[in-house]
């Protein structure tokens, strides 16, 4: 893997999140030497939105004292559906985007190659290269958020669909006749173990008077239920909150067990705010559920780890993908190993 | 891909099935030029069992008029658990085998490289190279038998665990509180859609008087329920038999939908005796269930095909793997694409 030619030796990683965005500048050893953050907002159309992205990259470059002519490549993690081949963001409802050729806009401005990746893929790749899953043969990344993100780094490359990401693990069914899921079915992993599913259960418990400390702090406001709030409530004695978290973590493990049977990962990296805020609880409950539910011959065949990079996972992974686009599996013709 | 050096230009494919075994000889264009079949039997230990395998290879070579000195490589598909790195059959209960170094025995006798592969992997690879899934980017193979075999050929290589096969798809849960499965849980794909699950349901229907034509033919003997018998019964008007098959095919589709969400295959190859005997029924019921249950964005993203190679899939795939062992993902160091 090269690190750019001549003076182009820095990599840019970008995380275009639904609520916030972040740009990181990396040197040729992938040490982060600059970073900038901004809220993702505005539905003023693609031109304005892309302008904000470019401004944020410039800001991070300035902090790193790197000129745009020194950028060797840019990687950008995006939550919405992408056309991987064309480098187009198909949809980004928060921004009111439709078919935005973000890769080309980045390449035009910085005159260097750019890649767009699914943000969960980029984050899992970051953990594979620099975090909890370094050197794994097959890394399964599981990131509960509003939905439940999944990614698999298989022998150094992101497992993906022909022109899109795959690993939509949120709709594995884990509970018979469970809660209604956004997809219209019942008992999907996402409907019981996502951050949103946990938050709504906690809120209901508070409303019923089972979590008085939490109720005092957040009232009936779903948007106030964050990891820190849950942590405080548990420490203050809200047993119901802990019970809900433990159950959700175990159900997450149940979904992961299905994936272990299918992909035989050697490492499972659990990320996202809740897993990182409650590492011991998640490790314990997930592992117990996985061991109970995987086929006997898979027991003990994997390691379960909590993500290490936090907010940096996506920008670090995206920068590394810019430097090693083969890991995105885009150089398909050379990858297919048939006569 | 080479076709062997000098006069070593023929490939041997072997299918070590639980009830029968089969050897095929292939020329450098993978045209089959010889074949031999034998029942798999005998628990006289590894030496006798391996001897029977070598005899069958010799028989096929003789039919093809190929000398053992002309064999460039041997591939062997095995149903039991394998140590892929060491080329050892860990268990083969039908033969009473434990830790049999089959690869070495083949290499010693024919003085050429040999590979052992999981038989489902070999069969799926056969369909990928020569059958219904030629040229697929990501092929998902699904083979209902006593259990339900699964395999994935991803960008030309078999998806696998570190030292074993993966894709144990039989234990995806498809029915809430369904029948008890061999694994101890309920409602696993295998418990409702395997050939065995279908046969037991059909037998029960016959016993209840709902499938008179079938009952007349097989009595209460489970082992008599084969594809041809089911076909005849349906043609003679046993509606219950058709209903059972349609339901099982739909449940198979339900399990496949979960896999489509995870792996985004471009082609799904359905194989095994029942799918091949009832191609239209399986195609229709599976496709309907998949389309109904996959995430909306995956609809229409794949093609469903019935396996084309029949009994030849495993020997053809195994021979091709012998010629292209990189497809087994064993040359790991070169495959990992990290700095």
Image (spheres, coloured by chain):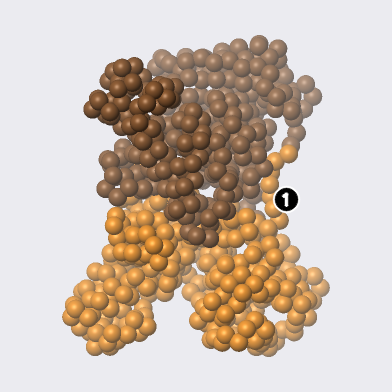
Chain colours: A orange, B brown
Residue found at x 48% / y 24%: B17
- Give residue B182's position: percent from left, percent from top: 31, 37
Residue B7 left/right relative to B102: right
Residue found at x 31% / y 79%: A230
Residue found at x 47% / y 15%: B39
Hey, which residue is sitting farthest right in the picture? Answer: A6
In the displayed structure, A271 sits above or below B226; it is below
- Give residue B250's position: percent from left, percent from top: 41, 43
| Count of numbered tags | 1
Residue found at x 55% / y 27%: B310
Which chain does the numbered disc 1 sit on?
Answer: A
Report whether residue B84 is seen. no
Q: If the image is split into quadrants, where does the N terminus of chain B sit?
A: top right
- Give residue A303's position: percent from left, percent from top: 43, 56
- Give residue B329's position: percent from left, percent from top: 60, 43
In the displayed structure, A197 sits above or below B298; it is below
Name the residue that disc number 1 marks.
A333
- Residue A76 sits in quarter: bottom right
Residue B88 left/right relative to B316: left
Hey, which residue is sitting farthest front in the picture? Answer: B237
- Residue A88 sits in quarter: bottom right
Query: B331 and B197: which one is in front?
Result: B197
* Label 1: which secondary element: helix
In the displayed structure, B139 sits above or below A115; it is above
Q: If the image is split into quadrants, where does the C terminus of chain B sit?
A: bottom right
Q: Decide: few, some or many residues near mark 1? Use Cα within 10 Å; few <14, some 14-19, many ≥20.
A: few
């Amino acid at each position: 893997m090269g690190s750019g030619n001549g003076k182009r030796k820095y990599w840019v990683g970008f995380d275009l999140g639904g609520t916030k965005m972040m740009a990181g500048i990396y040197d040729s050893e992938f040490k982060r030497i600059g970073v900038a953050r901004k809220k993702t907002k505005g539905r003023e159309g693609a031109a304005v939105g892309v302008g904000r992205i470019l401004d944020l990259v410039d800001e991070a470059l300035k902090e790193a004292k790197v000129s745009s002519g020194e950028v060797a490549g840019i990687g950008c993690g995006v939550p919405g559906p992408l056309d991987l081949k064309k480098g187009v963001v198909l949809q980004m409802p928060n921004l009111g985007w439709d078919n935005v050729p973000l890769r080309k806009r980045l390449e035009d401005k910085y005159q260097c190659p750019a890649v767009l990746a699914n943000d969960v893929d980029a984050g899992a790749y970051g953990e594979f290269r620099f975090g909890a899953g370094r050197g794994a043969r097959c890394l399964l990344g599981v990131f509960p958020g509003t939905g439940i993100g999944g990614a698999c780094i298989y022998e150094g490359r992101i497992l993906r669909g022909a022109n899109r990401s795959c690993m939509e693990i949120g709709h594995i069914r884990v509970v018979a006749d469970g809660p209604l899921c956004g997809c219209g079915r019942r008992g999907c992993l996402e409907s019981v173990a996502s951050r949103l599913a946990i938050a709504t259960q906690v809120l209901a418990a508070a409303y019923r008077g089972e979590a008085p400390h939490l109720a005092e702090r957040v009232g009936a406001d779903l948007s106030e239920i964050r990891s820190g709030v849950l942590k405080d409530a548990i420490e203050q004695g809200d047993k119901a909150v802990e019970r809900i978290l433990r159950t959700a973590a175990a159900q997450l493990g149940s979904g992961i067990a299905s994936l272990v049977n299918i992909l035989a990962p050697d490492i499972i990296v659990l990320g996202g705010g809740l897993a990182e805020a409650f590492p011991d609880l998640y490790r314990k409950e997930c592992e117990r559920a996985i061991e109970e539910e995987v086929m006997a011959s898979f027991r003990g065949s994997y390691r379960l780890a909590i993500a290490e990079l936090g907010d940096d996972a996506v920008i670090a992974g995206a920068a590394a993908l810019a430097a090693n686009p083969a890991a995105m599996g885009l150089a398909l013709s050379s990858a297919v190993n048939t006569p």
